Image: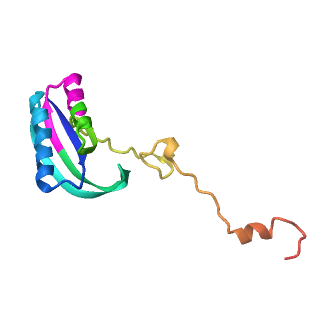
């Protein structure tokens, strides 16, 4: 079964009872369309990064659910949320299935050779070449012959 996450921002001026009733409506809407609610995470009132409907705050709730739902069922849930006047924003995303960890390949022991020049085990494109460095004052002093310094 696929897992989904529904993030809803509800009007912050609703009372606590009304906000809880809205969350229950969201859960019922999911169950009615063949989903199974796993977890509800209520964040509460948070400041918005930009005003929505001339409001600076919103009541956040995240609902995790799973189910073999087709696009029609997900579209019906989104439509019901859009038509609800208390909902300021909503977003349904599919939670990706975690990939199993990769097995590490055993590393080969580096070969020691006289040709490598102190770069044992490194390919030729990773070898560093060191150059003589001088300060800016040293470089400028001999740049112009015959110039008085």
Figure disc tally: 0
In the displayed structure, does residue 138 sit left or right of residue 144? left
Q: Residue at x 24, y 33 (%)?
A: 78
Query: What range is drawn magenta here?
Result: 63-78
- Give the x, y percent position of residue 54: 36, 53
In the displayed structure, does residue 117 sit left or right of residue 110? right
The residue closer to the viewer here, 138 or 107, is 138
In the displayed structure, does residue 32 sit left or right of residue 72? left
Q: Residue furthest right?
A: 146
Determine whether 78 is above or below 53 in the image. above
- Give the x, y percent position of residue 18: 13, 50
The residue closer to the viewer here, 57 or 39, is 57
- Figure quadrant of the C terminus: bottom right
The residue closer to the viewer here, 59 or 102, is 59
Q: Is residue 10 magenta?
A: no
- Figure quadrant of the N terminus: top left
Determine whether 39 is above or below 35 in the image. below
- Give the x, y percent position of residue 106: 26, 40
- Give the x, y percent position of residue 87: 25, 44
Q: Is residue 140 visible?
A: yes
Quarter residue 75 falls in: top left
Determine whether 137 is above or below 73 in the image. below
Q: Is residue 70 magenta?
A: yes
In the displayed structure, does residue 108 sit left or right of residue 8? right
Q: Residue at x 25, y 40 (%)?
A: 104
Colour mapping:
rainbow
Q: Is residue 95 visible?
A: no
Q: Residue at x 13, y 34 (%)?
A: 29
Q: Residue furthest bottom?
A: 149
Q: Residue at x 19, y 36 (%)?
A: 4
């Amino acid at each position: 079964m696929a897992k989904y996450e529904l993030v809803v921002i509800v009007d912050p001026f609703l009372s606590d009872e009304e906000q809880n009733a809205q969350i229950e409506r969201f859960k019922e809407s999911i169950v009615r369309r063949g989903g199974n609610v796993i977890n509800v995470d209520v964040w509460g009132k948070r400041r918005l990064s930009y005003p929505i409907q001339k409001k600076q705050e919103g009541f956040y709730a995240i609902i995790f659910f799973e189910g073999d739902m087709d696009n029609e069922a997900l579209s019906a849930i989104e439509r019901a949320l859009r038509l609800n006047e208390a909902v300021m924003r909503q977003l349904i995303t599919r939670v990706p299935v975690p990939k199993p960890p990769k097995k590490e390949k055993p590393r080969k022991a580096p070969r020691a050779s006289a040709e490598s020049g102190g770069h044992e085990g490194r390919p030729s494109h990773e070898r560093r070449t060191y150059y003589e460095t001088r300060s800016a004052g040293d470089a400028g002093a001999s740049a112009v012959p015959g110039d008085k310094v």
